[in-house]
Image (tube, coloured by chain):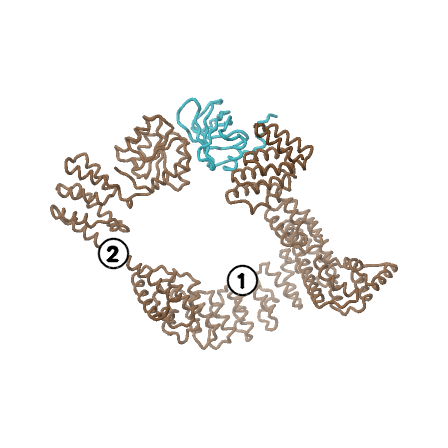
Chain colours: A cyan, B brown
Amino acid sequence: MSQESENRRNFERFHSEMSICWIRPIGEGGDFLLAEITNISAGGLLFQLDYPMKAGQELEVRFELPQNDELVEAVAIVRHCKQEQDHLYFLGVQFKSVKNYSIPVLMAYLEALYK
Amino acid sequence: MLKNTLKIKILDLHAVGDMSRINELIQTSLGQLRDKTITALESLLVEVDGKFRLKLLEILMQDGGADLVPLFINSIRHEKNTLYAKSQILLFREFKHQEALPALLSIENDIDAEQRPTYQRVLGRMLSQFSEQFYMSEFRSGYGNRRRTEFAADMMLRSPHADYIPFLNEQILQNDAGFRHEGLRILRELGDTTSVEQMFTLLSKLRIQRDKARALDGLIRAEHGEPDAFFRKLNQQAGLNWSAPQEAQFSESLARGEVNDLLEQVMGGFLLFEDVHRKIRPLLRDRLSGRVSSAFDESRAQQTMTEYLEELEQLLHFNVASMGTISQRIEDEMFVRRMEQYLPLNDPDRDRLLISTLSGFQSDESAALLKEYVNTVDDPELLALSMDALKNFEATEIPPGVQKFCEDEQNAILRKKAMTLLGEWELGENLIAKAMDNPSIAVRVDALQTAAAYKLTGTRDNILKLLKPNLPDSVLLAAVEAIRVFPSEQTGKSVRPFIAPPHGLKIRQAALETAFKAAGDDGLDTLLKMFSQDQGSKLGDVSETLLQLILNDDLAANQDTLLKHKDYFLDLFTQSNDPATRNRILQMFENMEITEEYHLRTLFSGLQKVMRSFKGQSENEEAFRCRKLAERLENLTKTRNVAAQRTRLLDSLLDTVEKHQGFPKVQALRKLGQNYRSDLISNNPIGLQRMLGLVGDALGDETTEVRLQAIAVAGKIRHPRLHKVLRTMTANHRGAALNSINNALRTPVDPIFIKPIKSIFVMDDSRYVTKQLSKVLAQAGYQVDFETKVHAGLARLDEGEGFDLLILDYIMPEMDGVTFLKQARTKETAPERVIVITSTRNQDELRDFLQIGIDGLMLKPFKMEDLIQRIRDLSNAVHDTG
């Protein structure tokens, strides 16, 4: 069993109603979009968004954390994207790096904040 | 040694960022020298920063041993950073050991408000994970500590679990009153057949304990004689059989005064509860030692035995009643028969226990058997028990045994119980009514109290008929109180005669309370008229009761009536020597919200009169309160007068503008401009609208002089609507007129006309941006609407809903934000205030916005809090319409 799937078991997924973050595909310019966080898991997030993204697409992600004056900057990669209905896509993304944080610590924060 | 070495190694590895080596080191160290490793880490955790501490705890949680629980708890308790504390709490829930739950509960009071939601979620999770074991362990820990057992029992009842039944089946057999009582309480709700069997065993134990306790109680209270004889009696009652050599040995021990071991052995035979054992031991020891006991020990032992016997009795009855309830639930039709067979005919409590059984097993058969008891037995105790038990059953007719006691003059307890049954069953109002005419005062009082307690409407007329001055005092008092539950004008009329002497004070107070609470719509007015006309001669001693009733009732609802009679209260204030009465009168007036001009004026002059009576004295608290109250009334009157004066002035100015044309209109407008102040229209929305209409019309007047004067007036009023008209006038005016318009527009809108932002329109092509922004803004209390298609957005603004703010995206596929805003403004449908949100950092594009005129620019991504703050600032700020 891989380390990742082990982690997945350790971190319980959760549902969150009002957790949002900004995302923008890296390298394409364009507008920042607001995405709704549906689940937080071991090393990544599940977003709801009204635009499709390709698997492998790298994203700039920005979170609000109450103890930070600035948004937390992260880079994530789209692992899968599934159309749920018209203009509604579920995007599974995995963090690659987070500025000033380690990924597990960020995840612990997100859980503390949104769960 | 290890402590320091491990710490240094971990810190060195941390310095080079090698977390995987730290992980390895800790796991190895835990495996080899666990206790020392935990001690070392405990000390290290307090020395490192929060982030590293959290990482170390994550590593420890991979081990997750129960012995790590205290270390985690300590760390959570002392973590200063709220978010790290929350993360640690979340991590803590990974413990799979039961010990984690009580440990988490132990820090409940150390958790601050910010951490509390996280703490409660984790606690909730753990409670659901370990709750059964936890509550059972709590129950067991409550041996000798009734409150702890009760708490655990409450929790078990709140979330029942099948595991509780076998556990409690065992616990009720423990020799502890708390275990038994609380165990039975839960089993009564949850128990099954196995519980009933255990409860039969408990019944046997309790009966044995009861018999031994009664015997011991007899010995304690009787003459005890020599130690040897007393010892033999004790032995016999304890049911202990000794061999001849043992007895000889005991005698020798007694002779030597060595009684401790003997006492323990003999007391063990009585199966006493632990606290009972402890409390009576000193007395028994003295008696076996041949010493004279202290009076304290004597009385304590007797008191303890009385309470112990009562407790055993309660347990016996509760046990059989609970067995009945369970058996009824599991539909064991034979249970009552089985209990009848089980209880020996010679058991002194047989009937009483059977009645308790029937009270638990609520079947038709049980009701019939209980009624049979009531109808056939003579023993008052059994009768009382049967009647109490019958309260749990419904009835359609009154058993003769109950009816018989309704008018029984001799037996007050049974009479009361019989009447209560009639009340519970809603039967036999005629019997209660008849009992009201009984020659016995006690029967009549009981009947009246029952009629009131169960609001027996059929007895109302009987009570009204009873209310005659020649009634005995206790009956009159009960009648005056009983009629209170039937509010009507007739009620008021019937009791008012009893408020005045010669009746006793208690009756008069009760009559006043009834008249106040139940005298119908005009009750209070009529009462106050009585008190006003009395001038304090007859009703003075109940005026305090009246004030208490007034202050305890709804003052706002009664205010008009009370103010109608304010002279009575002011006279009472002046005449009364009682500070409490005067305090209540002041309190009543102070708590009123008086708005009517007549009351403001007359109460003010009344208070002035009262204050004259303080003249020549230094100001005490009462005088101070009177002065403050009078000042408050005076200020209210003044404010109202000023507002009325302003309205009259504005009306007169506007009338003049309205009725004139040409030069007189110019004069009238000039006068309006000279006299206008914003307080003229504050709290006068009708006047404001009229003024805006008239000045707006004058701005479009054919006569240049009128228009020029109107421009000057509009410049003084500084209302956004007039500014808007002035801005449109700039296009078709030249020279001096244009200068006047520009001068008028230079002054900003008066802040009193600034409309706070309440409604927001969000225009962004992303559904998720509009959806999420709308959620956030709605949560912040704004009314929000949105569109993702620009043409639909423009159409939405065309509908003229009048949004207070537009939040506009710049980059949109069909039309950029600048064009959208220009189009909306051309059609005059754009909200006055605009915030643009954009990801662009292009300076030229940003300049476009600044040139077109907006109120705020937010660069994506931004914090939602910043957006809300920007809107709040805008809502409070003076809007520059220039």
List the residue tagged with mark 2: B644
Task: In the displayed orientation, state which residue is furthest to the right.
Answer: B245
**Residue B134: image tag:** none
Residue placed most toward the observer, B498 or B645: B645
Q: Is residue B242 left or right of residue B350?
A: right
| Placement of the N terminus of chain B among the 4 image quadrants | top right
Whichever of labels 2 and 1 marks the residue nearer the N terminus, that label is 1
Residue placed most toward the observer, B393 or B105: B105
Closer to viewer: mark 2 or mark 1: 2
Height in image: B202 above or below A61? below
Mark 2 belongs to chain: B
**Kind of residue indicated by mark 2:** Ala
- In percent of width and height, residue B166 lies at 68, 47
**Kind of residue indicated by mark 1:** Glu
Q: Is residue B256 left or right of residue B453?
A: right
Secondary structure under badge 2?
A: helix
Mark 1 belongs to chain: B
Q: Image point 28% across, 30% down: which residue?
A: B851
* Residue B491 seen from this side: no
Height in image: B149 above or below B706? below
- In percent of width and height, residue A114 lies at 50, 37
**Residue B426: image tag:** 1
Query: How many residues crowd around disc 1 within 10 Å: few (fewer than 14), some, or many (20 or more)?
Result: some
Residue placed most toward the observer, A45 or B617: B617
Q: Quadrant location of residue B92? A: top right
Q: Is residue B467 left or right of residue B312?
A: left
- In percent of width and height, residue B447 lies at 54, 69
Query: How many residues crowd around disc 2 within 10 Å: few (fewer than 14), some, or many (20 or more)?
Result: few
